[in-house]
Image (tube, helix red, strand yellow):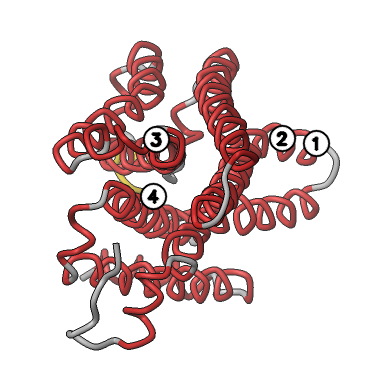
């Protein structure tokens, strides 16, 4: 009972400001949109046999998990609520993993568009449902790399007493030394460099096909180009998020209030925004999803 009173005291001492309310509204809106699209995917069996829709489903789950967990961390940090280190480690594993899952999945979706447009005869074989399941395993395996490296550095550096403490949970709390921050940044930059090269390669190859195409093929290739460009924009926003801590650290030395403003802007633009583009790119833009959303009828059919 005393514990409940102390928690209530913390929440009463720190009233919720407008910025926190705006973040909650945005998170709730985009989570509802994601959940709607997830339900549509689950109920419509025609989406279960298409590689791009399965990968889209993975991005929806990944984005939803990251939005939810990061928002919980935001609330805990705002109210300066401390938790046990082991629990913070568990939460951080989810954040670190799904921070990378989305851009890696976007890269896989770009490659799927490349195969569909540039290698149409092999698309059925390379992008079958079975191959897509293996691809999802590979995506999570590749995405776990930075998480393993960051936590390995932390476990090697932290003392045993550190694990017994309570702390305000954040991913930055596991960076005990400056060199660890540099290693983390280098790993992320390497990942996004590879993904950026992959998307650029796919764009160039699709562009070549688009110039030589005609009729229905030309329409398909142009739509593929737009999708690749939007994926590249998402990836750029995710990449900028890696630079935010450096910008925030520099601003913190100048003005604390400006630091708060910039950190809030960065969270909206480079944490929430990239995770809200997937429903637009493969949800509202996609003809099949749009028809189901428009009709909301169980008899809705999917065109191939």
Residue found at the very far right of the displayed protein:
254
Q: Position of residue 210 (x, y in %)?
A: 60, 42
Q: Is residue 186 above or below residue 247?
A: above
> Closer to the camera, 245 or 168?
245
- Determine the image quadrant of residue 268: bottom right
Mark 4 touches mark 1? (CB < 8 Å): no
Q: Report the residue marked by disc 3.
A: 115
For discs 2 and 1, the disc positioned in front in the rendered view: 2
In the rendered structure, which disc, 1 or 3, sits on the residue that comes first in sequence?
3
- Separation of disc 2 and disc 1 at Cα? 7 Å
In terms of sequence position, does the residue under pointer 4 or pointer 2 come before the other? Answer: 4
Which residue does the numbered mark 2 point to in the structure image?
Answer: 249
Checking the image for residue 82, the label placed there is 4
- For mark 3, give the secondary structure: helix
Q: Which mark sits nearer the N-terminus, 4 or 1?
A: 4
Q: Is residue 48 left or right of residue 285?
A: left
If you read the primary sequence from the N terminus, does the residue marked by circle 2 or circle 3 appear first?
A: 3
Label 4 close to label 3 by CB (< 8 Å): no
């Amino acid at each position: 009972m005393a514990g409940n009173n102390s928690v209530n005291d913390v929440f009463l001492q720190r009233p919720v400001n407008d910025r926190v309310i705006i973040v909650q509204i945005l998170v709730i809106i985009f989570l509802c949109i994601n959940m709607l699209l997830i339900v549509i995917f689950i109920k419509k069996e025609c989406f279960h046999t298409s590689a791009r829709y399965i990968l889209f489903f993975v991005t929806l789950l990944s984005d939803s998990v990251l939005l939810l967990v990061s928002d919980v961390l935001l609330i805990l940090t705002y109210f300066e609520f401390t938790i046990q280190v082991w629990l913070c480690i568990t939460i951080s594993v989810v954040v670190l993993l799904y921070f990378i899952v989305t851009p890696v999945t976007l890269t896989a979706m770009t490659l799927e568009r490349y195969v569909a447009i540039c290698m149409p005869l092999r698309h059925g074989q390379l992008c079958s449902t079975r191959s897509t399941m293996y691809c999802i395993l590979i995506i999570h395996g590749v995405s776990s790399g930075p998480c393993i490296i960051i936590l390995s550095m932390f476990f090697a550096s932290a003392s045993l007493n550190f694990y017994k403490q309570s702390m305000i949970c954040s991913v930055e709390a596991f960076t005990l030394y400056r060199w660890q921050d540099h290693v983390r940044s280098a790993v992320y930059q390497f990942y996004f460099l590879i993904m950026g090269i992959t998307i650029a390669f796919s764009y160039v190859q699709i562009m070549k096909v688009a110039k030589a195409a005609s009729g229905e093929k030309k329409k398909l290739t142009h739509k593929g180009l737009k999708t690749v460009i939007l994926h590249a924009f998402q990836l750029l926003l995710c990449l900028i998020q890696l630079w935010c801590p450096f910008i925030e650290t520099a601003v913190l030395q100048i003005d604390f209030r400006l630091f708060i403003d910039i950190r809030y802007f960065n969270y909206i633009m480079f944490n929430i925004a990239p995770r809200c583009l997937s429903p637009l790119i493969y949800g509202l833009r996609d003809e099949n999803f749009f028809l189901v959303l428009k009709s909301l009828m169980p008899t809705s059919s999917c065109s191939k």
